[in-house]
Image (cartoon, helix red, strand yellow):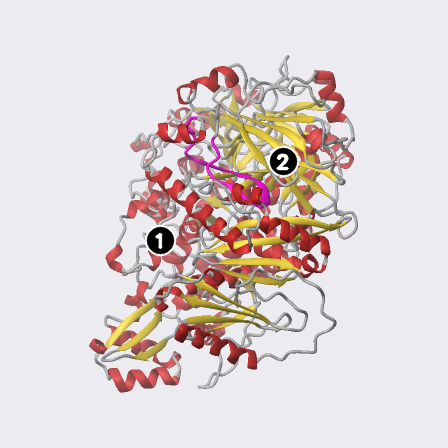
Amino acid sequence: MAPMMNSLMGSITEHMNGLSVEAAPEPHQAHSPAKGRSSILKDTGLPQIAVLGSSSPQTDVSTIQWLFPQKFCYERTQESIVLTEKDNQLGLVLMIVDCQTSGQTVPIHWKNATFVLDEREIIIAAERCRGKAATVFVRETIEISKGVFTTLVVIRLSGGGNLVMMSQQFLQSQKGRKAFAEFVTSKGNIETLDRNRDSMPDSMQGENLLQALEDEFDHRSHRRKSYETGSLSDDDIQSLTGMPTRNFPTLGLSLQRKHGFMQQDVPINARLPISFETDLFAGQMSILIRPQHPEDDPYHYDQVFSQTKVRFVLQIQGKFKYIPQGTVFAGLEVVDDMKAALIMQGFCSLILRHVRKNHPNCHHSFGDEKGEKAHIVAPAWTFFDRLVATKHKSTPPPVGEPFNESHGSVSARRSSRSLGAWNTKDTYSFASYSECIDFPSWHLVDLSFVRNSDMHNFLGDSPIKIVMYEHRDMTVAPEKHLQVYNHYLFSLQMTHLGSIPEAEDALNQDEENVETPETLPWGKAKKSCRYDDDYGDHLSDNDWIHTQGSDRNDDESIECEVDDEDCVDDAMLDIGRQGLPSKALLEIVNDICPGWVEVITDEPGKYKKVYAFQVYKSTKVVFRTPTEFKSYLGIHGATQYVKSVSSPRLSASEEARRILGYAYSQALTKYTSKARQLATHKSPIDSQFLRRENPRREPGATNSKIQKAGFVARALSEFHWREEFVQLLEDHMAFFHPLRAKPSFRIYCSSVIGMKRTADDGEAARFAGYSFLQLETIGRTVYLMFSNSEERDSWADALESAVEANKNENQVGVSLTGIDDPTDQFLHKSSLWDCKQRRVLNCRRFSFGVPSSDLDPTGLVETALFAVNEAQESPQDASKLVAFLDAVAALKDVDVFTISDQERLAFFLNLFHLMVMHTYLLLGPPTSNFKYVAMSEMVSYQLSDDIFCLAELEHNIIRGGTSYPSQSKLIVPKSQYEFSVTSSDFRINFVLTFGAKNQPESVPIYKAPILDVQFEAAAMVALEKVSAEKQSRKVLLTLPRLLQWYSDDFGATTMDLLQAIDRYIDEGCRSILAEEVDGDDKMLTLKYLPVDFECRPVRLVSIKARGYNASFKAHEILI
């Protein structure tokens, strides 16, 4: 041990010599640490030096750098790693000894390192602790003077050491020093922490306390491992806990106890209450969750859930240990930071609006970097569904049975603005119930104001806590609930465990560890990206549509009947193919068959699908089913032509519209008798559509709340409409099937930011004789069709009054609550395309026209890039967000067939980065390769009469002339697009950026004239990390992982690859390869750098075109 100590102390001395120590001010009195402990408490100007033993020092260093961002730099020696403070404000030096390398037994005084830090640093470090790498063992908050609190935190590192952190105020205060002394010598505390010891001496010092912490950690880890591996039987568990085993494998519960301990594996649906004590409250609790099947928990199902819709019951009972001085709040708190994504904000805003109806004085926050967690809470006095105060010496209601509070008392308490009057003598019984949170599936269900929603949509993978805390801060930031000022009486953490654990990063594994395709996200969704050539061959009559709370319907094909007399002449197949192949077809069909409509039937929830046809030389539109159409006209030739010029990704209904419309147009050129008969055929739908009488018993709200009611048709997609009964209420419009009580769609007046009246002029649709109204929200434009202009104007006037009465500030957070499901505002499941998994991003406006060669694709995508950049910088500015969403919606109408291949390559590169930025703005960046892959096959753009997801844009369009991944576990889509890029330039691999940590944070706008210059710059940046290291007999060459995935782009052999990248790597690396390898790839060992898929937002920069030379640094990009 002596040589090792000399080495360590020599290293410390060396670092000490590098420290500049200022003259210390007057020293303050501080509590002396226990003898023998390696702890240097801050003595103002003097450095703090500590030695910490570790079984995994590199992991601990990484963890410490995560806990204290930008605070430490480190240097490795043979037996240790020394961390020193970058700015040297506190003189911190921490030496982490590699126990495994030294082979020595680490003494107890190397198990713990104590530092005095700033209070905020301590709080942030405690909050950043995650998983096995760092665990908060102790978190003690002490009131050192009236209204002033400080914190002691002990963090256990994965290498076995403990970081003990306290603030300077803690030690400067006599009360703080006394509290610390009481804390480390408290027998009660030790007994709480260590179950394996029967007794502890009252004189126990700090080392014993921390040893007890270690024992407790090992004890808990052993029990958890035994529980998870099945080495404990159900009888063993019940004998240990006195409670039955849980039947909720998707949930993990942790309960806070004294000093911030979180007890793991808290039983659910236990028959006995669970005792607990925090620093501020002592009592017992019970948590009951509705079992999925009665047989899973027959006792609680019969006793609690069989006669009610309640899904969750929480009971807390106990006494305050002191009289709260601040407000006691209760509610939900999110453990991890929430993503600042628009859809998340939309969900949260929608929920908040309705929570405020029951809790008008609730407090909420999305969290910030200053120490406030995302939360939604209300004063505990009004939050709980039941609250019973039992006087001293009286018997409180038993936990596990209902807490009886009269209806009048509940109503008076919850409607009051009282904050409650608490004391330490009464026993308080709190109960909270919920019918709408299904914790096992992690869903919000049965809410009247939103569809069933996965809580991962707005929580991500974060656990949530049900909390009660006293909040005292009345001076620094009274509007914020900072963690440092929250004193927790109760905290129950719930973690969803239902997801299949993510395997190691398959994209970064070596080839021998190949997984089957079914285990990867691409394998799960291959059908959404690959298409059968025989798709949509036949037309069949799909007259009936049944909807149950969904606006979307799976299309079936329409049966094809061949009629030689009505076959379209083969000459039509030779119609000009200049520009967009389907342009001529759409110009004809959009006028003559403007859409298909779901019309109301007499059966609840059922609609009948018909197609609209413009009558020749008339302002009349008629509606026909495919069967009725085929009884007059044949469609075989039209089918051939439509398939030859249209995307194979069309839905069956849209393909049928084009086939029927084109067949009808050909018949009209001769105006045959059959065409006249089709137009004059008697159908009740022609006279009933939008002209029905209001139902006698209207669905939805009571008549007293209805301001206007009638029938409209609402556009579900371009060319797809649904007839509905609509009610205008005080604050929203509700759309129904008249025989169903629940609305299928709602739009709130407060979210309407614009309104426009249009006719059948192509801006909405070409239904002759009908009138249209556009209602604009931030994320979508809702298109409504009326029977005539008078009816439209009457509705518009009523809506304008309602919108004015509900007018709100023009802010994103306010307006995102406009539609039942915020996802629908920004991610459209379009019925034009046969893509169940796809969601169209550029959906704020529908396009009822034809893609035009008059539009400049390059200019429009550049405009959209600048707009998304502004939206990223000002996410709460609704005007900038709307401008961006309109800019990307305009891309639907571009014709990319009319631009050169070089311009097309620049266009699609910009479009790729636009889609990435657009997606991250809505959903937040993905945090793993699995999430990125799943996201990339969902988000899509509609453009040039086709649709493609992000994965197809990358692999099938931009990489259209390059190779598929040859040494990767990626299962990429293999869709075919006529406008795919044909370039085989290997540098394409370096210009696509999706925000991975080892990619540039910013992207340029690519321009065709300087594309080669920009590609050179991107290649130099991507290959900066290429390194060559001489080894005993070979050269270790480290390359980016992309060069392994797309090796075929660089040539057939390793030497071809080296030749391709030679001009981009630095001179030293080039020299080693020339001297040691000399064309013989057997002298090389290749290593590939992993791709970190914890993505960041992508920003926009511009590259100033200039010449390149050997000294040019490609990353010198001008913003």
In the rendered image, the quadrant that contains the N terminus is bottom left
In magenta, the rendered stretch is: 244-267
At which x and y percent is residue 863?
59, 60
Give amino acid for label 2: Ile
Res 25 → quadrant:
bottom right
Q: Position of residue 916 (x, y in %)?
A: 50, 56
Q: Which residue is the site of mark 2?
A: 351
Position of the C terminus by quadrant: bottom right
User: Label 1 sits on what residue type?
Assistant: Glu
Residue nearest the viewer, comparing 741 with 770: 741
Q: How many marks?
A: 2
| Camera-side mark, 2 or 1 | 1
In the image, 49: left or right of 478? Answer: left
Residue located at (68% from left, 30% from top): 383
Check residue 406 in the rendering and tell me which mark sits there, or answer none: none
Which residue, given by chain and number where applicable, does mark 1 sit on?
Answer: 504
Q: Regarding mark 1 in the picture, which secondary structure is present there? A: loop
State whether residue 409 is above or below residue 44: above
- Residue 839 at x, y percent in the picture: 48, 44
